[in-house]
Image (cartoon, helix red, strand yellow):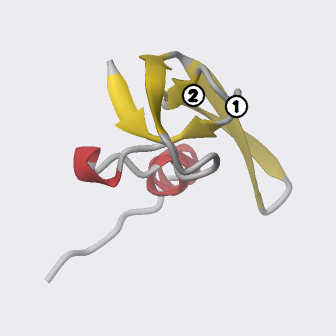
Amino acid sequence: MKKICPYCEAETEVEVVEKIERINIRGETIEVLAHPYLCLACGDYFEDPKTGFDFLQKAYEEYRRRKGLTCFRI
């Protein structure tokens, strides 16, 4: 599949890969499984903003779950 890579700024072939992102939140490491694109031209990983996936948000949700914290939505 072809996408425009934000790093090499070219329309290149990309692959969707599984990658574990490790985020440190208040001294605790939270691992989140992400599915970024891998640019086959330059080798950098990038997310497609159209997917709506935010690994930072997922990490904070997991941290709150572990600590028994809830998030109130209005």
Q: Residue furthest right?
A: 27
| Residue 21, image x, y percentages | 66, 35
Mark 2 and mark 1: Cα distance apart in space: 6 Å
Q: Residue furthest front?
A: 10
Please determine whether, in this image, residue 57 is positioned above or below residue 15.
below
| Residue 59, image x, y percentages | 55, 48
Q: SS at mark 2?
A: strand
Left or right of 51, for residue 70: right
Classify mark 1: residues with Cα within 10 Å, few (<14), some (14-19) or many (20+). Answer: few
Q: Which residue is mark 2?
A: 39
Residue 49 occupies which quadrant of the picture?
bottom left
Residue at figure coordinates x 60%, y 20% from the top left: 40
Question: Is residue 35 among the parts visible in the rendering?
Answer: no
Please determine whether, in this image, residue 6 is positioned above or below residue 34.
below
| Residue 12, image x, y percentages | 47, 29
Three-letter code, disc 1:
Cys
Q: Which residue is mark 1?
A: 42
Question: Is residue 13 among the parts visible in the rendering?
Answer: yes
Q: Are marks 2 and 1 in contact (CB under 8 Å)?
A: yes
Please determine whether, in this image, residue 22 is positioned above or below residue 15.
below
Placement of the C terminus among the 4 image quadrants: bottom left
Three-letter code, disc 2:
Cys
Residue at figure coordinates x 63%, y 46% from the top left: 8
